[in-house]
Amino acid sequence: MSAGRRPGLVRSRGAWQWHLLGASARRPSRRGSFGQDMWHWGKKLVAHETGHTFGLPDLYAFASETDAHRFVGGWDVMGLVGGAGPQYFAWQSWKLGWTQDSQVVCRASAGSDTVYLTAVEYGSGTKMAVIRTSPTTAYVVESRRGVQADTAVCSTGALIYRIDTSVRTGEGPIRVMDAKPSATPASGCRPLDDAPYWAGESFTDAAAGVRIDVLGADGYGETVRITKS
């Protein structure tokens, strides 16, 4: 792989996987709920529980006094099982080895990269751009389209989320950034269902020195620029 294009990715991968696997191992037992959940969620529940078998954490909140799905909404089957966009995040797919290192661009030092992201629902192309911000944290941007498992999504575009592998399962190890936090979701949609960023929009975390610009889009993905200062 190109060391200049993806600095630090493979070196840090094992540590990031370890944190997520460790977090998943501490999740509370749900013995006895699978039977009734199967009737409610159907085949999506199999994808969710199989994800746990492979080491993926729960992405919904265990402390659900407000909204149990405030971290990722319906954007990954490990969150809201019946959500509108149940396709696994590109991060999850990479963690499991389904997305190859060659399909990832990682920015670990100051600088910028312009990347064309093919939507995660398709098999080929670059699947995510990552800005590493610490040994256990990073921002990820991926493209989502209303095809395959995600035919019911309420919005498409560049989906941005923050990873923190030191956070336990059920406490938000992945958190989606909302491009439209003040917007009222369309009928039948939930908060965060309209989270993707569109061409011309940008995300900034000044404290982390991170900026992500969506430069353009077509039917298969987005062109983004990731910058670390």
Image (cartoon, grey):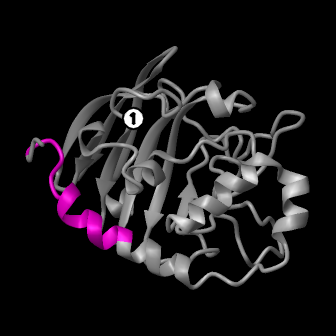
Determine the residue located farthest toward the top in the rendered image: 219
Q: Position of residue 205 (x, y in %)?
A: 42, 55
Q: Is residue 205 above or below residue 137?
A: above
Can residue 92 be seen here? The reply is yes
Callout 1 crowding tier (Cα within 10 Å): few <14, some 14–19, many ≥20: many
Label 1, on which residue? 213
Reply above or below: 126 against 7: above
- Residue at 74% across / 39% down in the picture? 84
Magenta span has 70? no
Residue range in magenta is 4-17
Q: Position of residue 118 (x, y in %)?
A: 42, 26
Residue 33: percent from left, percent from top = 84, 72
The amino acid type, in three-letter code, at marker 1 is Asp
Q: Is residue 51 above or below residue 142?
A: below
Decide if residue 191 is in sight here: no
* Residue 82 coordinates in the image, percent (x, y): 79, 48
Under tag 1, what secondary structure?
A: strand
| Residue closest to the eye, 50 or 213 | 50
Q: Is residue 192 left or right of residue 64?
A: left
Of residue 142 and residue 16, the one placed in the foreground of this image is: 16
Query: Is the N terminus in the top left, top right, bottom left or bottom right quadrant?
Result: top left
Q: Residue at x 75, y 79 (%)?
A: 63
Residue 183: which quarter of the image?
Answer: top right
Q: How many marks?
A: 1
- Say which residue appears at 69% left-offset and 65% top-offset: 60
Front residue of 29/70: it is 29
Q: Main secondary structure of the magenta part?
A: helix
Residue 72 lies in quadrant: bottom right
Identify the residue shown where x is 43% and y is 52%: 91
In the picture provided, is 6 more to the left or to the right than 77? left
Q: Is residue 5 magenta?
A: yes
